[in-house]
Image: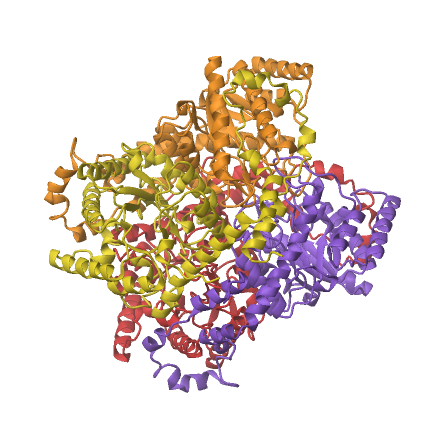
Chain colours: A orange, B yellow, C red, D purple
Amino acid sequence: MSYRPVPGDRFSFGLWTVGWQGRDPFGDATRAVLDPAESVRRLAGLGAYGVTFHDDDLIPFGATDAERESHVKRFRQALDDTGLAVPMVTTNLFTHPVFKDGAFTANDRDVRRFALRKTLRNIDLAVELGARTYVCWGGREGAESGAAKDVGDALDRLREAFDLLGAYVTEQGYDLRFAVEPKPNEPRGDILLPTVGHALAFIERLERPQLFGVNPEVGHEQMAGLNVQHGIAQALWAGKLFHIDLNGQNGIKYDQDLRFGAGDLRQAFWLVDLLENAGYDGPRHFDFKPPRTEDAEGVWDSAAGCMRNYLILRERAAAFRADPEVREALSASRLDELARPTLEPGETPAALLADRAAYEDFDADAAARRGMAFERLDQLAMDHLLAARG
Amino acid sequence: MSYRPVPGDRFSFGLWTVGWQGRDPFGDATRAVLDPAESVRRLAGLGAYGVTFHDDDLIPFGATDAERESHVKRFRQALDDTGLAVPMVTTNLFTHPVFKDGAFTANDRDVRRFALRKTLRNIDLAVELGARTYVCWGGREGAESGAAKDVGDALDRLREAFDLLGAYVTEQGYDLRFAVEPKPNEPRGDILLPTVGHALAFIERLERPQLFGVNPEVGHEQMAGLNVQHGIAQALWAGKLFHIDLNGQNGIKYDQDLRFGAGDLRQAFWLVDLLENAGYDGPRHFDFKPPRTEDAEGVWDSAAGCMRNYLILRERAAAFRADPEVREALSASRLDELARPTLEPGETPAALLADRAAYEDFDADAAARRGMAFERLDQLAMDHLLAARG
Amino acid sequence: MSYRPVPGDRFSFGLWTVGWQGRDPFGDATRAVLDPAESVRRLAGLGAYGVTFHDDDLIPFGATDAERESHVKRFRQALDDTGLAVPMVTTNLFTHPVFKDGAFTANDRDVRRFALRKTLRNIDLAVELGARTYVCWGGREGAESGAAKDVGDALDRLREAFDLLGAYVTEQGYDLRFAVEPKPNEPRGDILLPTVGHALAFIERLERPQLFGVNPEVGHEQMAGLNVQHGIAQALWAGKLFHIDLNGQNGIKYDQDLRFGAGDLRQAFWLVDLLENAGYDGPRHFDFKPPRTEDAEGVWDSAAGCMRNYLILRERAAAFRADPEVREALSASRLDELARPTLEPGETPAALLADRAAYEDFDADAAARRGMAFERLDQLAMDHLLAARG
Amino acid sequence: MSYRPVPGDRFSFGLWTVGWQGRDPFGDATRAVLDPAESVRRLAGLGAYGVTFHDDDLIPFGATDAERESHVKRFRQALDDTGLAVPMVTTNLFTHPVFKDGAFTANDRDVRRFALRKTLRNIDLAVELGARTYVCWGGREGAESGAAKDVGDALDRLREAFDLLGAYVTEQGYDLRFAVEPKPNEPRGDILLPTVGHALAFIERLERPQLFGVNPEVGHEQMAGLNVQHGIAQALWAGKLFHIDLNGQNGIKYDQDLRFGAGDLRQAFWLVDLLENAGYDGPRHFDFKPPRTEDAEGVWDSAAGCMRNYLILRERAAAFRADPEVREALSASRLDELARPTLEPGETPAALLADRAAYEDFDADAAARRGMAFERLDQLAMDHLLAARG
């Protein structure tokens, strides 16, 4: 079986991923600046379908209008030459020191207004380039100390900002939805909307909740020790998985942004299984950082690895789901019973209370003796993941 | 200043906290069974206002109706004698082995039905005893392996269960609201609704969301490395802080249930500051476990410590908020600006776009040079916490 | 390829693993008591080589001498019948409430003396049954609060205890070495000798360091977020890997004791690669807990899965090391240069200072441009792990 | 009580701490370069005793000999003007991209040789300036993937490097000791010698172990979820606490380097209690980063806060130890019994075996009923920490 990606696989990459120069808190850049047009060409050559960016990835902060135009033109040319799509765009509201206390929730009101304007401007470009999803990562919406941020006030400001963005795309008639990206911490000590759950809950208090969903990132959930498959399943259940950032992370520590598959391989397997089987049809977007030990060629090895690992896991998940022994094992573990409603159609509390089988005649000790057979089921999954069946 | 609790402080304790016998995964009980009536009397003597319980804390699983009646009567007598209230009640859906794969989301449908019946029965008792809040902790609603639980199906089952409970209290005309308690893991590898955020989001998909809120537990949020103050502030912002479980935890590890104040003292300070100043008027409920190294007397020292630490922190938070230098420092850190809307009243996207001060004439570099003065503010907080001002 | 274990694979299991009844902090036992003799027979049937135990696993705490004799006899018979070895034995110094504050470092001196006597007694049995390794896990040697344990005093007491044990086996002429097992926390808030490193350091201060090594457990290191491969490599480097406990853990949380392979699969791969290639010749000992959702049959599925996963990973690691492209990639990543000493044979500081190529003529910028090619190498490892080469 | 630091308090700061410009993985510098001489003057003005530095903090990487001389001269002048000492010096082996794969354990041999030379050169300067301690933090001695670093080989290279440094200072007759600084991860995925324990163990395999000790950093231990007081107590117990880095960290996440006292306040209290009472007489060195939200003045507020918090905690710890009720409580918790040897003077294994009181006549159940009274003791500590006694 070959694991060569094709555009139909819907793989996309951020310009900032392959373009990362390797500057970290303790060290200077190890790689040269990468021309966005070159990135487009290399990604297309590897079989990707799309490319995404922050405004400042394409057009340096503070560029003149003429420079801006020239950067966009050059980028468009590369897109036209390669056929790469721009399915998603986002804003950089964290690199310039003006955002040191956040953007939409900065204590300084003029910074908040500037952040909104920077975002509105880039939304226009996003739509121009055909993007359907606009990601909002509140990189520095948070605090390191307790009095520095009144969280209630900050959430009010965040709602105000998102409501304005929703009003704008509605008024403009843009076909664009927003995907909020949660992260628990780093670069701030604690960040608002730290997990998929917090973001989903917040969205429900917006003026136009239907325009807002989430963009979970594998590593961000794992930085809080959470099960990625579970969080993304809840987002899907809520109808809110608008986009996804795939990468790797080795547990609770600094944000590693490893290539997809590196880090927790078993969670990666279950995530692919979920995405392929639960109706997600958006891009498979990689938000990773090729380690700074790599040179320019290593960057492309790392990018190719992301796609290859996804394809391997997709194959293994499909085989797992197709295996008759697995189906039998799922049934032995009563997954079919879980799919069945607990109540009879239309059953009322009174009816349930009247059912003696449910309580008075239920033998709890006997029921407790039934094994769940999860270990056998999980070993079958392991065998499929490792291609060790038979 | 004395730190003696009085009923007006609204401190409550679970029977299972002071009654914990000290059985842990590696060891047998170190303390004898504690009579619930005795707990009521001791708690009242210490200055508590209320007592709470799981059904099985009061009435052993499988008790006959006569035994049940006798246990309840004895407990009521103690309440009457002491004036202690029962502000909250909850169900034990995790100790008996029949719940080994969960309760409302167990793969076995008959277990789910039994769990609903067990809950309904205890809701009647809760109302009888005057409780206004019913806590739902899904102790074992989760999994250790990826195929063992279809999360979408499980969330459907959870919704079904909560909708039934909501229907029941509505039909009965009970004045009772539900508080869902999140926890990331333990005793299951991963638990559904792992954080305050996930629970808040889930509630929005219920039939009667107005009946449902959250019961965050300090240590449960800290087991996911999350900032407790932030999570609870979001619950308050959403109008959903129906109850709270106060205790202590030393970071990301097994569930420690230390007395309140032990563990992360600075987060405890900010939490008290928040509860006292952001309009929470429910009980201050302690869900802790006196360490198993303690004998019977140590249990009461531990319980008294929970209340004492709350009172000390309450005093310090009040002094912090009243200090004119703190007010000046909050202003220097522009907390007042954060409280001010980002937009002018009625300001539209078009109006914002027309404001050149917001973007074209905004000097980002100059704005970036403004210091936030958070360190001075945080040191003032530290000084107040430690009573080291002056 | 078949993955059937045989005794030559040197797989061993603790009686307490398959015999775990599933009691956890929130729930009662889900499985019946398992007869040690039955465990021996089942493990032999699965292809294991050895069985290990705590004194109390075999002989209940407080048994009379006659009961003791009968239990041992019955166990010996099962060993004789099956040919299973007893390569390691250990002491239970944590279940009985007398050990609630520890054993060798309990504040109570009489508890410490009792713990020593309990250990000496079981050492005699260990030797009688042919064990060559005696594991010491200080289950409760720790504290929940700062003043409760003077760590310096406690380490003095621990040294005293180990020195006594060392003196005993020396005087008796026993061919038995001790393996200290580190764990960061649980059941105590913090445990002394929390990692492989702390245990290795401690050993160096004993009277007979040569008799003492470590028994690292996969999950225990991962509970501190540490890389298992690294910690065990340091133990091997120090000549101190006397035994190993294999299991699975999903990151930093409560002690999960999953079957080997579950949890962090990539670390499991590198660990097997290390054990097979770095000269470890002791037992591959599984210290896991079949999840309490399993019934009696599930227990054996779980045990079989431990061995199967080890064999799969052993096969994959061997293929990785044998692949010529991997060898080339290792060389491209300069692993061969790492194996070469930094200094010339006998090179003195003065000689190094005189070498202009090392500093004055070294072009740091040019050297910095060399890529390490780690991503390609790691993808080759991933391909081998997943059997996705070609 | 005033909390004004004086040189006799032995507080020291790294040039890189107050001089940190606020560059982080997601953002550019927020503060201007700070002149080392200015830092010296400001620190002296705040009451510090010493200043420390990496070579590149004082002399930019690649400076000519003339530039170097000028930088050193200017710095010396500031030292002379203020009376500040230079108790410790260290090497920057992580910022320049040439160190992207480490220094003493880089796979490239020429990088390793260069790193040694860079270190030797700076040792000369350290001695010239009167330093008695040389800290070695292996910032990038580690890996992100399993095959990228053979840990056994890497530890051989690390030993070789330290043995060379030990030989050098011995040959030169320098009065200088080395303090190895552990860190679990960041900027590498996993770093060699991740904890105090691993570093202590490693030192024992060096040629001149007496020249080597550790330099634990509060936050580094907490990044592995370890108890700082415990780790540093073990270092003291081993006679190896040569230096210490004080700062703050909020649990397991990226390296925060908060000012001392921020983060885990209770561990900070116990750490100060330990340092003041267990014979540590070295500098109290702060290795923190003023948050990038601060401007130049905020930097000095943050630095002053480090010292103030230490002094407050020192006062509280002294009051705790001096309180007669605390002494009584320590005795009630049998800390005095822990200080007493478990064995009688000269007691042999045989003598212990002959003592029936230790085993045959020991009533384990009765002993188990004794409470440890740790909760009362810990509440007394809390009261002293919070100045809430009486």
Q: As rendered, which of D43 and C209 lies closer to the eye?
A: D43
Query: Taking B291 as reference, is B323 above or below it?
Result: above
On screen, residue B116 versus residue D235, left or right, reads left
Q: As rendered, which of B166 and B294 lies closer to the eye?
A: B166
Residue A74 in percent (x, y) is at 64, 15
The answer to whether one can see residue B385 in this image is: yes
On screen, residue A313 versus residue A148, left or right, reads left
On screen, residue D19 versus residue C97, left or right, reads right
Q: As rendered, which of B134 and C278 lies closer to the eye?
A: B134
Q: Quadrant of the N terminus of chain C?
A: top left
Query: Taking D15 as reference, is C166 above or below it?
Result: below
The answer to whether one can see residue D150 in this image is: no
Q: As rendered, which of B148 and B28 lies closer to the eye?
A: B28
Quadrant of residue B258 in the image? bottom left
Quadrant of residue D314 in the image? bottom right
The residue sitting at 59% across, 28% down in the picture is A92
Total numbered labels placed on residues in the image: 0
Residue B260 in percent (x, y) is at 43, 56
Residue C105 in percent (x, y) is at 47, 72
Residue A353 in percent (x, y) is at 13, 42
Query: Taking D94 as reference, is C145 above or below it?
Result: below
On screen, residue A57 versus residue B281, left or right, reads right
